[in-house]
Amino acid sequence: DANDTTGSTWYACTFQAWGSGVSGNLPGLFKTTNKGLNWTHILSNSHVNSCTINPSNPNEMYVGTEADGLLYSNNINSGSPAFSLVNSYPFRHPVRVFFNPYKPTEMWVSSFGNGMMVADLSCNLAAPTVTANGTSLLSTAATTYQWLLNGNVIANATSQNYTATQDRKSV
């Protein structure tokens, strides 16, 4: 863990041994905070290939697993971190996950048989706030705009302001 200035925090990714009759070999992700004297099993039942900590947020970790896909935790420093599937990663077997050392908001994920994907984590997808004044609608600032009526695209309604031409309760 590059955020631990003492160098005491490490992570180990493990697979379960192949074959039957092998005991004591647990798959998953392990963490130590005392340079390997003691280890805590923080992710079980996954064959873990790789893990990386977001250099912009020391509480975030991404984990590549053989069968469970790309996993994410936003509380890696808690006693029991929670992991969830990254649904936007379309492949089952991410092999390596790491951040671009020259652009820390860019994460690279290589997969078994599906090439390399790049994600820009600086993208902010916060929902806009819409203010209504009669039939006039105003959105908070965004890069692009598309107004919808009951979930359907309104043709040519692509600016920050929109004046409704129909009297509807849902826009």
Image (cartoon, helix red, strand yellow):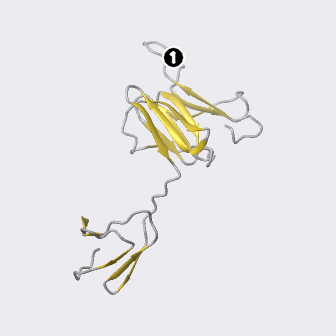
- Residue receiving disc 1: 23
In the rendered image, the quadrant that contains the C terminus is: bottom left
Q: The residue under label 1 is which amino acid type?
A: Ser
In this picture, residue 161 sits left or right of residue 55: left
Q: Could you say where residue 13 lies in the image, as x and y percent from the top left?
A: 56, 28
Judge by depth and name the residue closer to the eye, 106 or 45: 106
In this view, the residue in front, 163 or 26, is 163
Q: Give the percent coordinates (x, y) of residue 6.
A: 77, 37
Residue 160 in the figure: left or right of residue 149: right
- Please report the residue visible at 45 percent of the width from the left and 58 percent of the height from the top: 125
Q: Secondary structure at mark 1?
A: loop
Q: Residue furthest right?
A: 6
Q: At 50% from the left edge and 47% from the top edge, which residue is drawn?
A: 120
Q: Which percent across, then down, holds residue 109?
A: 47, 35
User: Is residue 48 visible in this depiction of the protein?
Assistant: yes
- In the picture, the quarter occupied by the N terminus is top right
- Which residue is rendered at x = 69% and y = 38% of the image? 2
Q: Where residue 30 sits: x, y (%)? A: 59, 31
- Residue most extreme to the bottom: 134
Q: Quadrant of residue 131?
A: bottom left
